[in-house]
Image (cartoon, helix red, strand yellow):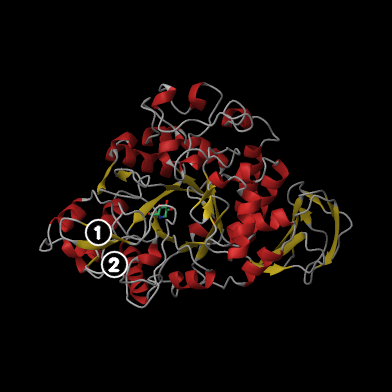
């Protein structure tokens, strides 16, 4: 890798729900010591950076995204010394760790809010956004549509409304207050000094409010975020900020600034379009979103994913597409939540290995750094009958012993039941079963990760569509220096023969998966046959 390549551009990220990962002390909750025990597994998988979901003190009304103390770790996870050990052990294995930075709101149990709501004269009153008028900011959408009727909640004590973009138990902080802006920097400093490698910054579009706007992506928000970045660069070089801005790519572009705001930003709308293309056996929606995806500054990178801990969000699709996605992927109304689908990757793709491989292969070959959601590397199932988004946050399935090897607690004491159904139950789907099976999803993912990381072109290369008439074939190239990678994916259930040609390449390409030269293909002519849902990665190297 070239010396100048920032680490996050050629990395594989992995999202860990610590509560769900491994319970080291038998209390039924995953914890930091448990995660430490599993670092070798993650290293073996090839993961470079873990994103930990919130582990701070919280009443858990939003699974930790409602923080009541930013400086302490929830007891069930362990304590600060466990956290330091985790960082140390991860770093020794070459694994980085980023944590959630929840800036937009706190829990209503946070002492700032307790003080703020206690009286209009409280010095903390202005830490939050209060109003006599609950029609203020009425152009603002509601995000948690299934539970919240308004972004304002009336507080009896002082007779005013407070502002919240998420649950009413998550009051929004007031970023017009310089003390709030400083407090967030202090929190960052605390965790950065402990050695973390950066933050996944939660819900960043919503920091400021201005009348007459939709209260998303405001210029004031960008100014503050740039301030944070400058602070990071000055004091903690090589650490990163990853933006959670569930927006259209043209709007996420602003979060990269001129390379002086976020290092990375999630690319939300690619995700549903991979599912759409697969089900329609037609690349059109994927092509469309890639065309909407602007170039980003050189030192920035998209972060791409197939699933995460939330519902599969359908915010970045049209109403018609959303209805179609719900019909196809969430036929049971229980599978729907807010504007999304509360299911995991493997059940969404009917546990069809070829489709699961293909979805991952498309993701890994597209521009951006891929992030894997824990458990999806073994094809874990979900439990749609659990509340909220908890159905995709069930215990990691390590083996077929009690509680899937996750915990020694009595099953009734687990924070959530393990998956037990016929298809996805832990006796069938678990790490131990898959680790020694060369045909398992886990070993497929390992190879995918390996190939992706060892071919820098996938991380840095320019992107171009290949000209193929058949809409069921998604084909594109990535080019970097003297190398061109070609990914050809068959979305259909039919065998397809593919002929196309490529300019500027010589000789026979190498088929990366078989490590054999591709027959019948020379000097840019490609002739091959793809089985249903098969994909190939071809590598051309020209001598310079
Ligand atoms: C986005 C997080 O991914 C989600 O889980 C959370 O509920 C909201 N932000 C509010 O923090």
**Front one among 308 and 191:** 308
Query: On the rendered structure, is 257 left or right of 189?
Result: right
Pick out the residue farthest to the bottom.
212
Q: Residue at x 82, y 48 (%)?
A: 531
Given contact means CB atoms under 8 Å apart, are the residues at marks 1 and 2 in contact? yes
- Pointer 1 or 2: first along the chain: 2
- Displayed quadrant of residue 158: bottom left
Residue at far left of view: 121
Can you say whether 301 is above or below 291 in the image?
A: above
Look at the image and tell me whether residue 232 can be seen. Answer: yes
Q: Vertical placement of 207 versus 50: above or below?
A: below
Quadrant of the image containing the N terminus = bottom right
In this figure, which residue is indicated by the disc labeled 2?
Answer: 134
Quadrant of the image occupied by residue 399: top right
Residue ID at (87%, 54%): 519
**Image spot of residue 74 (x, y percent):** 29, 40
Q: Is residue 294 left or right of residue 158?
A: right
- Between 248 and 50, the one lying in front of the other is 248
SS type, badge 1: strand
């Amino acid at each position: 890798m070239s010396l100048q390549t920032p680490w996050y551009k050629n990395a594989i990220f992995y999202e860990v729900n610590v509560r769900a990962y491994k319970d080291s002390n038998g209390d039924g909750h995953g914890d930091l010591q448990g995660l430490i025990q599993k670092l070798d597994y993650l290293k073996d998988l090839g993961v470079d950076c873990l994103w930990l979901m919130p582990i701070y003190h919280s009443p858990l009304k939003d699974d930790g995204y409602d923080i009541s103390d930013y400086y302490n770790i929830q007891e069930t996870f362990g304590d600060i010394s466990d956290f330091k050990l985790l960082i140390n052990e991860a770093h020794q294995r070459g694994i980085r760790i980023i944590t959630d930075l929840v800036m937009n709101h706190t829990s209503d149990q946070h002492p700032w809010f307790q003080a703020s709501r206690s009286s209009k004269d409280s010095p903390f009153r202005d830490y939050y956004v209060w109003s006599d008028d609950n029609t203020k900011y009425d152009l603002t959408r509601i995000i948690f549509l299934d539970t919240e009727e308004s972004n304002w909640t009336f507080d009896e004590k002082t007779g005013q409304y407070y502002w919240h973009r998420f649950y009413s138990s998550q009051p929004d902080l007031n970023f017009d207050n310089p003390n709030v802006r400083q407090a967030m920097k202090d929190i960052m400093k605390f965790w950065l000094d402990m050695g973390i490698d950066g933050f996944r910054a939660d819900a960043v579009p919503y920091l400021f409010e201005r009348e007459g706007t939709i209260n998303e992506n405001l210029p004031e928000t960008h100014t503050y975020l740039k301030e944070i970045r400058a602070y990071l660069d000055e004091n903690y070089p090589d650490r990163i900020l990853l933006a959670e801005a569930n927006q259209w790519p043209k709007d996420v572009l602003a979060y990269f600034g001129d390379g002086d705001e976020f290092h990375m930003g999630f690319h939300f709308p690619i995700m549903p379009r991979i599912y759409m293309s697969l089900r329609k056996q037609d690349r059109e929606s994927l092509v469309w979103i890639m065309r909407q995806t602007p170039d980003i500054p050189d030192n920035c990178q998209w972060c791409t994913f197939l699933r995460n801990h939330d519902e599969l969000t359908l915010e970045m699709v049209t109403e018609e597409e959303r209805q179609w996605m719900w019909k196809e992927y969430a036929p049971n109304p229980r599978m729907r939540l807010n504007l999304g689908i509360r299911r995991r990757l493997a059940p969404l793709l009917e546990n069809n290995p070829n489709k699961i491989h293909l979805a991952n292969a498309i993701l890994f070959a597209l521009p951006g750094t891929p992030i894997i959601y824990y458990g999806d590397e073994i094809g874990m199932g979900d439990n749609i009958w659990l509340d909220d988004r908890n159905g995709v946050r069930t215990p990691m399935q390590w083996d077929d012993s009690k509680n899937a090897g996750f915990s020694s607690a009595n099953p009734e004491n687990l924070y959530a039941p393990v998956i037990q159904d016929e298809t996805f139950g832990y006796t069938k789907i678990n790490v131990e079963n898959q680790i020694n099976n060369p045909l398992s999803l886990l070993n497929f993912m390992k190879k995918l990760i390996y190939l992706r990381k060892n071919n820098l072109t996938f991380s840095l290369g320019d992107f171009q569509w290949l000209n193929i008439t058949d809409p069921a074939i998604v084909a594109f190239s990535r080019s970097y220096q003297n190398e061109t990678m070609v990914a050809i994916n068959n979305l259909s259930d039919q065998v397809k023969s593919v002929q196309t040609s490529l300019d500027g390449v010589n000789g026979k390409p190498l088929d990366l998966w078989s490590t054999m030269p591709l027959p019948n293909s020379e000097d840019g002519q490609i002739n091959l046959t793809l089985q249903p849902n098969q994909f190939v990665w071809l590598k051309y190297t020209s001598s310079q």
